[in-house]
Image: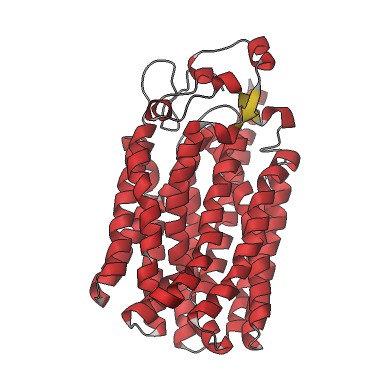
Amino acid sequence: MRRSEDLEDAASTSLGARRLALLALFFLPGITISSWVTRTPSIRDALGASTAEMGLVLFGLSIGSMIGILGSGPLVSRWGARPVILSGTVGIIASMPIVGLGAAVAQPFVVAAGLVVFGLGMGTGEVAMNVEGAELEKHLSRPFLPLLHGFFSLGTVIGAVLGILATAADFSVLVHLLAVGLLGVIVFVPAMRHVPAGTGRVPRSRETIPAEAAPQFTSESIESESSLSESPASDSTVADSPRIPVWRDPRLIAIGVIVLGMALAEGTANDWLPLVMVDGHGFEAALGSSVYAIFAAAMTLGRFVGGPIVARFGRPSVLAVSAAFGLLGIGLVSLVDSQIVAAIAVLLWGLGTSLGFPVALSEAGDSGPNPAVRVATVSTIGYLAFLVGPPSLGLVGEHWGLRTVLLIPMAVIIPVLIIAPLLRRGGRGRRSDRPGEPHTSPV
């Protein structure tokens, strides 16, 4: 009896340490990305770059992100999440001094190279961390991914505040980003000790689902579980069925569209919001960074309070309302020529996009068999939109203006308003859309 209690205490302690470690690791990409984003006006001035040239520099981020994101899912499936998280976080930390050095020597190629390293690290590490987070959420039996992404947003708030102070004081970009890299090392080393091995590692044969279990892509099929989940099948039936990739599951495709829209909206703010405020609304550089800090704070608030909201109202309702808030916020920033309205609208933009990505990832994990593969697939879509999409907006913004280019993420959010309500599920034998409620269908 005593031994059983000791084992339970040990398991609880291990789960708690794993939770704290993952929160710390998610904090690091937030503080690093906001540290260099808030310094983009200073970096642009140091490089003497135009909007289009800054877009080309930011394509370094796109290149690294594309490689990292597309490679992360297979790497997690083959080796598990831990080594991918480790290598990705090392890349994120190492990128900071490279970007700072490029600004110090006024070499755009060095800055772009630093962003390639950052993109590689974030692309691989973030997908793996979401797989780990989705697995931990199942063990905790309550929403965890909103809080996890909340620590990313908390990192962006702290990084933005430090960036504002550094910009206002005309502090060296190189010294600033070197300090951020050092902080990353201090957080990273102890946190990695508590990340378990093996999460997300699956045999290749399990990365597909039976073809007969894949429903047609209609509103009815999105609303309901796949036939595999509704009708338990024997192992022999599943084994003998022809198999298709999980990305052909219509429900997962629908979730992917949601993640695409919400992640692009979030990534656009992270890459361009300070410059939108400076070039599009006439803010001073420090004030432009301050508006970005407002966005980051709104994101943090939404994610920290989002867990109980999701548990109360369910994922489909939260996703639909989030999309509406985000659409309104971006629209006001883009279309209304007022600094006051723009600053207030950024609150709506941040609150609206705060829960979209993490809640959709939770939905992907519960959408059918092989949850790790499903979370990795949807994470790949999300991080492509988050990291690769926004830099391309700079080329359009050079000709049409950064405020006008915000119409693109607005257009991508509109389908979310239509698709999110279709994710509702009901009836016996179907999974609940709220973590912590029992699943009556087989995984």
Name which residue lies at 40% across and 53% down: 412
Tell which of 264 and 188 is nearer to you: 264
Left or right: 123 with respect to 193?
left
Which x, y percent locates residue 94?
69, 69
Which x, y percent locates residue 110?
68, 79
* Residue 357 shows in the view: yes
Name which residue lies at 37% across and 55% down: 411
Quadrant in which the N terminus is drawn: top right
Q: Tell me where residue 54 sits by quadrant.
A: bottom right
Residue 265 vertical placement versus 37 (above, below): above
Name which residue lies at 60% across and 49% down: 127
Quadrant in which the C terminus is drawn: top right
Q: Tell me where residue 404 sits by quadrant.
A: bottom left
Left or right: 308 with respect to 247?
left
Tell which of 401 and 387 is nearer to you: 401
* Residue 182 shows in the view: no
Which x, y percent locates residue 387?
55, 60
Q: How is the image coloured?
A: secondary structure
Left or right: 123 with respect to 435?
right
Which x, y percent locates residue 442?
54, 19
Q: Tell me where residue 197 sits by quadrant.
A: top right
Residue 37 vertical placement versus 76 (above, below): below
Tell which of 398 and 312 is nearer to you: 398
